[in-house]
């Protein structure tokens, strides 16, 4: 919640005037509950419900790493979440394998943004995920590791550019 990737994503969303909610998953930081790697999708769903109640606006989802994996799963079927952003999409991390089969039927615009040396989402693995994901979709690699070390501004500019493209009315 307080790392540089999440902070820069928040700043990108704020630049468009969007309210942003950052939260800890169960069992992280001062939150209650026990982290198990699967039930955290319900945490995203609860956050979505709160955002919808408080702001009555469509939600643009942006998640980083584990948060991206859980958030994509929660947001793909939600009709009030029109755009999806996955930063540092993990394929394998800390002995945990991630499955994205649900993306085959997720027809929302999706941006996948990763470091070109991401230790948890290597090029080939992410390209395989993308090959099976429904469109529209875009996979962008930026120099750097999982945390976009030394390239956070490029990450943020890419995110802002994609959002601008998605939010500009087409004629």
Image (cartoon, rainbow, N blue to C red):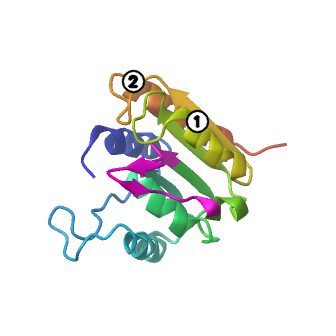
**What residue appears at the point 70 percent right and 60 percent down from the top-left corner?**
104
**What residue appears at the point 45 percent right and 74 percent down from the top-left corner?**
45
Secondary structure of residue under mark 1: helix
Residue 115, horizontal then vertical, whole percent: 45, 31
Q: Mark 1 = which residue? A: 124
Distance from label 1 to label 2 (Cα)? 21 Å
Name the front one of labels 1 and 2.
Answer: 1
The reply to whether dot 1 and dot 2 touch (C-beta < 8 Å) is no
**What residue appears at the point 38 percent right and 36 percent down from the top-left corner?**
146
Residue 155 seen anywhere in this rendered image of the structure: yes
Q: Mark 2 = which residue? A: 151
- Within 10 angstroms of label 2, few (less than 14), some, or many (20 or more) residues? some
Residue 57 seen anywhere in this rendered image of the structure: no
Q: Quadrant of residue 23?
A: bottom left
Residue 35, horizontal then vertical, whole percent: 27, 69
- Please state the total of marks drawn on the protein image: 2
Q: Quadrant of residue 100?
A: bottom right
Q: Nearer the viewer, residue 20 or 96?
A: 96
Q: Which of 135 and 4 is in front in this view?
A: 135
């Amino acid at each position: 919640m307080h790392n540089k990737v999440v902070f820069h994503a928040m700043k990108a969303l704020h630049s468009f005037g969007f309210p942003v909610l950052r939260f800890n998953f169960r069992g992280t930081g001062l939150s209650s509950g026990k982290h198990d790697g699967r039930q955290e999708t319900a945490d995203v769903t609860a956050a979505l419900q709160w955002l919808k109640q408080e702001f009555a606006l469509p939600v643009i989802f942006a998640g980083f790493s584990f948060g991206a994996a859980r958030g994509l799963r929660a947001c793909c079927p939600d009709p009030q979440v029109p755009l999806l952003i996955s930063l540092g999409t993990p394929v394998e991390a800390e002995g945990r394998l991630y499955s994205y089969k649900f993306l085959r039927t997720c027809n929302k615009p999706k941006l996948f943004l990763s470091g070109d040396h991401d230790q948890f989402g290597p090029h080939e693995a992410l390209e395989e995920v993308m090959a099976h994901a429904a469109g529209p979709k875009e996979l962008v690699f930026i120099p750097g590791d999982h945390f976009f070390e030394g390239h956070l501004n490029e990450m943020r500019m890419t995110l802002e550019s994609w959002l601008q493209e998605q939010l500009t009315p087409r004629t």
